Image: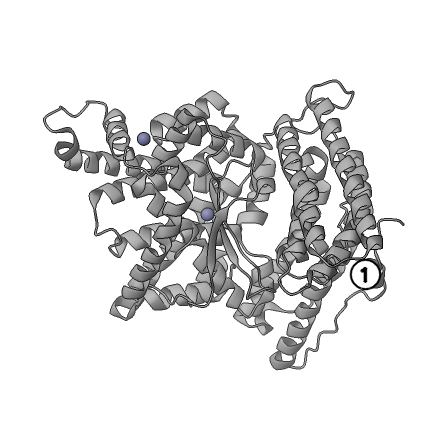
């Protein structure tokens, strides 16, 4: 078996099993602890891409190939672990262990569902891309450049087999994922034409390894080009297997994916209905603020009768204050220390001053998905590594596109974006998650908790007086919040209710006041992902509900700082799990 690597074969032989000691809870707790630690270790061995992505550099020479053998191996192993986990009675576990058990079970069930039911490895060619892995290997802060290049050399030898497998797996891809795969694999090529060659030039290597690397690079590039040209043939419809699958997954699969991925106490349909109600409330509030600010910006000009038009005019007026396209990155860089200062002064939560946040241009292979800014963290195994705030530059935008984008991310909204992405949003939450003692909660982090926290942070910062309660900032906050709400409405409507591109864009531009560029990007994203867009509003709703419940329960003993720090201390566990413990 060409595709099975030594660590895998070894694992087949030493399959983790456990013997539960039923004598008392203490022993069960201990045995669960050692069992779950062993599961994590072995899990990362059979998931080398996952391990690398979270900063574990134990097996950097292996390029994981998602072929049938590897899927079967994982399924078999997960089944064994599921049986072992079932032997631990919930009543004997600590709160944190119960969360770990549920997270593991959920992941194993999710993986089974992905392999047997969802099968995106067949219809999403963008799942095959080798760029990021090589970049991560080279970014390992703890290895010498020469050592890293020897790993890169071994990894390069596996690229042809990787794409051979990819082509054998793909069947009736969606047009949308085909195009994404082409863009992202094109984007990855710079790693083999620039990044690795530059590293080779800097390193102290003998001719033998240099030649081997060069040969590997040539073959890798040939494989990528070959993959891309096959995808182009499929895309142009000139192939037998080019019948395209609809990107919409439908209500049934959507609810299932929602259950595994969001792990909410609500169903997708329930949260969709809550979002519809919230949309109407936000529009009301925005109209009220528009009336309040009208004279200041429009003097004696009458307020339009159509409420949505009035709100749209106010947004347009306030959106005119924005930074220049060339200083987008620098503007973001300047705001970070201001947010830190506010949080420290207001005692919102403890910020670890030893963890640096680096604002940088998004690397090219990560572009193409339609997102403007995102956090890229070093993971639980690389606690001293840098956290990056990736910002897409507007270099490829025309003047009109750039203007549209900058109006969307105007001076008010850009502050909210930084709260969401950086402080106290994603970056701060990740710092806490990486300190959480449970590796399982870091590894199987819940997206709705992570996004919900960032969305919660926006509202909480304004409630605490960030921006001195300026109506303009609140107004733009509501516009932004409406976007989270709209993400849920769009995701559900497009994937489950067959909403068309025209209807979706009309909804975004007219009812959620989004600029055309934003709406175009969001449409693209809604065609490429499912459920993820629901995570923002679902997580927010559940975190806010939890805080309000605790406020009521504790009365004047409630402290915001304590609430935040306790909430974050569990790592990225699903909100209902955390709520369960905090309400007890
Ligand atoms: Zn302008
Ligand atoms: Zn986010």
Task: Indicate the quadrant where residue 209 lies.
Answer: bottom right
Q: How far from the left and from the top, in percent, is residue 385?
A: 56, 62
Q: How far from the left and from the top, in percent, is residue 262?
A: 53, 48
Does 135 sit above or below residue 552? above
Q: Nearer the viewer, residue 280 or 233?
A: 233
Query: Please, which residue is most extreme toward the top here?
Result: 238
- The answer to whether residue 455 shows anywhere in this view is no
Of helix, strand and loop, which one carries label 1? helix
Q: Residues within 10 Å of mark 1 (few under 14, many from 20)?
A: some
Query: Residue at 70% of width from left, 40% of height from top?
Result: 128
Query: Residue at 59% of width from left, 65% of height from top?
Result: 439
Q: Nearer the viewer, residue 380 or 325?
A: 325
Q: Nearer the viewer, residue 526 or 582?
A: 526
Q: Is residue 382 left or right of residue 239?
A: left
User: Looking at the image, what colour scheme do you see?
Assistant: one colour
Query: Please, which residue is most extreme toward the left here?
Result: 300
**For the C terminus, which image quadrant?**
bottom left
Q: Is residue 362 left or right of residue 489?
A: right
Query: Residue at 43% of width from left, 29% of height from top?
Result: 517
Q: Nearer the viewer, residue 504 or 57?
A: 57
According to the picture, the residue beneath numbered tag 1 turns out to be 7
**Mark 1 CB lies closer than 8 A to ligand 2:** no
Q: How far from the left and from the top, in percent, is residue 162?
A: 78, 43
Q: Quadrant of ligand 1?
A: top left
């Amino acid at each position: 078996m060409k595709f099975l690597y030594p660590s895998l074969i070894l694992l087949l032989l030493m399959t983790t099993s456990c013997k539960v000691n039923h004598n008392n809870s203490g022993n069960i707790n201990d045995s669960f602890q050692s069992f779950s630690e062993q599961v994590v270790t072995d899990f990362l061995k059979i998931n080398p891409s996952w391990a690398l992505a979270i900063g574990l550099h134990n097996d950097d020479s292996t390029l994981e190939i998602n072929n049938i053998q590897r899927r079967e191996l994982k399924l078999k192993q997960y089944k064994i672990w599921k049986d072992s986990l079932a032997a631990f009675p919930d009543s004997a576990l600590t709160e944190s262990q119960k969360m770990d058990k549920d997270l593991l079970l959920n992941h194993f069930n999710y993986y089974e569902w992905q392999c047997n039911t969802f099968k995106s490895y067949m219809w999403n060619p963008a799942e095959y891309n080798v760029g990021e892995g090589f970049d991560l290997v080279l970014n390992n802060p703890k290895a010498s450049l020469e050592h890293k290049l020897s790993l890169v050399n071994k990894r390069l030898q596996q690229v042809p087999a990787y794409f051979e497998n990819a082509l054998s797996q793909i069947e009736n891809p969606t047009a949308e994922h085909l195009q994404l795969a082409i863009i992202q694999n094109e984007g990855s090529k710079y790693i083999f034409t620039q990044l690795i060659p530059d590293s080779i030039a800097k390193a102290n290597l003998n001719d033998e390894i240099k030649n081997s690397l060069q040969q590997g690079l040539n073959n890798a590039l040939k494989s990528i080009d070959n993959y891309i040209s096959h995808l182009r043939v499929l895309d142009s419809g000139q192939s037998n297997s080019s019948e395209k699958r609809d990107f919409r997954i439908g209500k049934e699969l959507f609810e299932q994916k929602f259950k595994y991925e969001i792990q909410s106490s609500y169903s997708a349909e329930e949260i969709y209905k809550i979002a519809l109600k919230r949309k109407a409330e936000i529009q009301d509030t925005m109209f009220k603020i528009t009336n309040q600010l009208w004279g200041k910006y429009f003097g004696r000009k009458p307020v339009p009768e159509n409420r949505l038009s009035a709100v749209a005019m106010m947004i347009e007026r306030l959106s005119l204050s924005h930074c220049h396209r060339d200083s987008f990155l620098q503007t973001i860089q300047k705001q970070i220390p201001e947010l830190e200062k506010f949080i420290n002064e207001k005692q919102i939560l403890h910020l670890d001053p030893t963890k640096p946040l680096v604002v940088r241009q998004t690397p090219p292979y990560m572009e193409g998905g339609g997102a403007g800014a995102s956090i890229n963290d070093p993971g639980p195994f690389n606690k001293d590594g840098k956290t990056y705030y990736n910002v897409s530059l507007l270099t490829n935008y025309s003047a009109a596109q750039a203007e549209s984008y900058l109006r969307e991310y105007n001076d008010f909204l850009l502050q909210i974006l930084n709260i969401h992405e950086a402080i106290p949003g994603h970056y701060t939450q990740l710092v806490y998650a990486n300190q959480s003692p449970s590796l399982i909660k870091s590894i199987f982090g819940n997206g709705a908790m992570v996004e919900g926290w960032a969305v919660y942070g926006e509202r909480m910062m304004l409630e605490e007086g960030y921006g001195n309660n300026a109506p303009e900032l609140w107004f733009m906050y509501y516009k932004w919040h409406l976007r989270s709400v709209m993400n849920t409405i769009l995701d559900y409507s497009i994937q489950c209710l067959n909403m068309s591109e025209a209807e979706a864009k009309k909804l975004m531009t007219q009812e959620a006041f989004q600029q055309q560029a934003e709406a175009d990007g969001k449409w693209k994203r809604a065609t490429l992902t499912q459920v993820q867009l629901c995570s923002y509003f679902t997580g927010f709703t559940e975190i806010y509900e939890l805080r309000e419940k605790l406020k009521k329960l504790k009365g004047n003993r409630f402290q915001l700082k304590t609430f935040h720090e306790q909430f974050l201390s569990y790592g990225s566990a699903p909100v209902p799990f955390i709520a369960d413990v905090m309400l007890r």
